[in-house]
Amino acid sequence: MPQEKKQNRKSESSSHKKRRQQQVRRQLILIATIAVVVIAITGTIIVKTVSGKKTESEASSKKVTAVNLDEADTTEGTKENEEETKPEEVTDDRAGYAVSPGVSVGSDTETEEKVVYLTFDDGPSSNTQAVLDILDRYNAKATFFVTNINPDYANMIKVAYDKGHTIGLHTYSHDYGAVYASVDAYFSDLDAIGQLVQQQIGYVPCFIRFPGGSSNTVSAEYSSGIMSTLVQEVQNRGYQYYDWNSSSGDGAVRSTAELIDQGTAWDGNNLVFLSHDANSKESTVDALPTIIEHYQSMGYAFKALDRSSYDAHHGVNN
Ligand SMILES: [Zn+2]
């Protein structure tokens, strides 16, 4: 019996020893694993920190070089930042369209390029949005010679401008008797529409269209010879006037079919195309897609007037 006990104790102690050894082995493996993981993480952090510091120092040395050697690089960086913060802003030079006495505007000769300069007089109106939607659909740019006939739509001047169309001055009142009463009366009306447009787009544009065009004879009823004076005087003051060499005939009451018929009949290189953006001119809106499609299929581009565009002057009759 004591012999047995002794043996049992012996085997007990040997299995206890084995278990201990296993425990120690497990602990060692655990410690080794933790050590490997810790080393790996630490290593990664160190590598990252070092390479990060390297990039930073490279960048700052580049910055110093740019500042010291090349101002243009710095400007470019600033421009990029501006684009990032204001992505919706149109980046163009249309502030150069501001009236500037002594700086001539317009060209009296056509270019070889096939261009339609669509122009819309008498707006903005209840039809302006529809016209803008059609122009967008065909990626066409145009020019709006605006008035104060519908003050409720004045905000559409800015809407059209922000889409890349040119804004020109037509007249504030569109009352021939008042506008052509005298040279002073004309310029006081022109100043009023200029101020309205400035409120919308930030400057007074240099592009104008006379009510009735420079060839009108109506003005003779109010002031003999006034157009001969005005065509010269507006240019002296830094403006240019634009007449037209093509039209759908929408100044009169016409059906959509008649507007398309006349509107697609032109074939010059630079078509300064008269049309109207007035509350009553729904047929102009209806005819517009077909007219645009016609000229685009003939290879014409639809552009907004700029300072170098053909001005299509008429002969003066008063
Ligand atoms: Zn008009």
Image: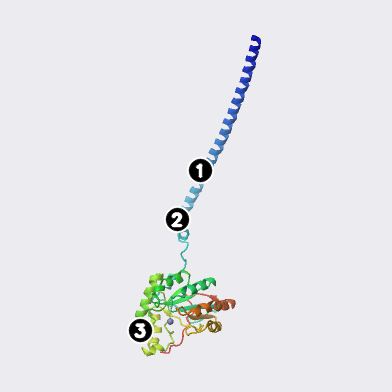
Earlier residue among tags 2 and 1: 1
The residue under label 1 is which amino acid type?
Answer: Thr
Query: Going by the image, does 260 lie left or right of 174?
Result: right
Image vertical order of residue 34 relative to residue 176, above or below: above
| Residue occupied by mark 1 | 49
| Residue occupied by mark 3 | 178
Binning the other alpha carbons within 10 Å of mark 1 as few (below 14), some (14 to 19) or many (20 upward) gives few
Residue 6's x, y, as percent? 64, 12
Whether tag 3 and tag 2 are in contact, CB under 8 A, the answer is no
The residue under label 3 is which amino acid type?
Answer: Ala
Foreground: disc 3 or disc 2: 3
Residue 285's x, y, as percent? 50, 77
- Spatial CA span between label 2 and label 1: 27 Å
The residue under label 2 is which amino acid type?
Answer: Val
Report whether the residue tagged 1 is closer than 8 Å to ligand 1: no
Q: Residue at x 36, y 80 (%)?
A: 189
Secondary structure state at the residue bearing disc 1: helix
Quadrant of the snapshot with the N terminus: top right
Residue 14's x, y, as percent? 63, 18
Earlier residue among tags 3 and 1: 1
Image vertical order of residue 22 relative to residue 251, above or below: above
Count the marks: how many? 3
Where on the image, by quarter, is ligand 1? bottom left
Snapshot quadrant of residue 33: top right
